[in-house]
Amino acid sequence: DGGITQSPKYLFRKEGQNVTLSCEQNLNHDAMYWYRQDPGQGLRLIYYSQIVNDFQKGDIAEGYSVSREKKESFPLTVTSAQKNPTAFYLCASSIFAGGADTQYFGPGTRLTVL
Amino acid sequence: GENVEQHPSTLSVQEGDSAVIKCTYSDSASNYFPWYKQELGKGPQLIIDIRSNVGEKKDQRIAVTLNKTAKHFSLHITETQPEDSAVYFCAADYGQNFVFGPGTRLSVLP
């Protein structure tokens, strides 16, 4: 069964802690993306990766970090430097990022900072 | 940079009526315009897309129209059903990524 999986579905974090969100895809897509979604707003790009061992900052990268050691995996770490991390986080992938290509989304992780 | 506006922000229609959501974009270089449907607590799902070499595309009850001159594109849903209730997002490509509209919450009333 092909697709994009994100875990966990719900995540709670205390202030000052780092937390890592998982994103895995078995679609053999080259490009992967992380978005943040806040109520009433569109999706905002955090980081994206076009190829293994390479990634680029999006519009709101401050306070986040990523790695792309494997084609299938693109974990996102929300660090304690992120001032307002409570949000819904979405991972997406596309066949390649050489131009406009359809992005497919995972089910999302809802992060709440206590 | 690219900016995508989407209207209306909320839309209520009676079951069986049509719904239209409109988006405008700013970058004339944009060539690909997908539409996503997002149900509560889930990730967005692609429902239809259009590229700049066509003016209209249909898939059963869903259609998208594109006016490149005016830089706007619209989603049309006919014969709406309660399961069409969701948030709909438009997007426009910008370089190697996308810019998304803020979303439209569609409610189909039985």
Image (spheres, coloured by chain):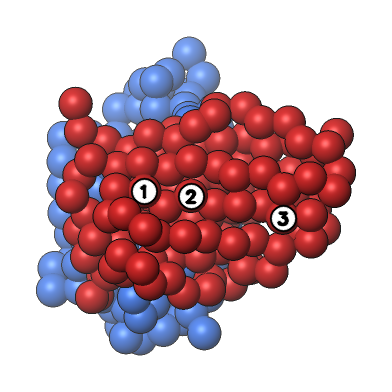
Chain colours: A red, B blue
Mark 1 → mark 3, Cα distance in angstroms: 19 Å
Per the image, label 2 sits on a secondary structure element best described as loop
**In the rendered image, the vertical position of residue A109 relative to residue A101, given as above or below:** above
The amino acid pointed to by label 3 is: Thr
Q: Is residue A18 visible?
A: yes
Assess whether mark 2 and mark 1 are in contact (beta carbons under 8 angstroms): yes
Image quarter hosting the C terminus of chain A: top right
Query: In the orientation shown, which residue stands out farthest toward the front?
Result: A69
Q: Which mark is residue A73?
A: 1
Residue at screen point 42% across, 19% down: B82
* Chain to which the residue tagged by mark 3 belongs: A
Q: Is residue B74 visible?
A: no
For badge 1, the amino acid type reads Ser
In the picture of the structure, the residue carrying the numbered disc 2 is A75
User: Looking at the image, is B39 positioned above or below residue A58?
Assistant: above
Residue at 46% in and 74% down: A56
Callout 1 and callout 2 share a chain: yes
Q: Is residue A29 left or right of residue B4?
A: left
Q: Quadrant of the N terminus of chain A?
A: top left
Relative depth, front residue between B109 and B5: B5
Which residue is most to the top? B110
Q: Label 1 marks which chain's residue?
A: A
Are labels 2 and 3 on one chain? yes
Pinpoint residue A39: horizontal percent, then vertical percent.
Answer: 68, 44
Query: In terms of depth relative to the viewer, which is nearer, A90 or A53?
Result: A53
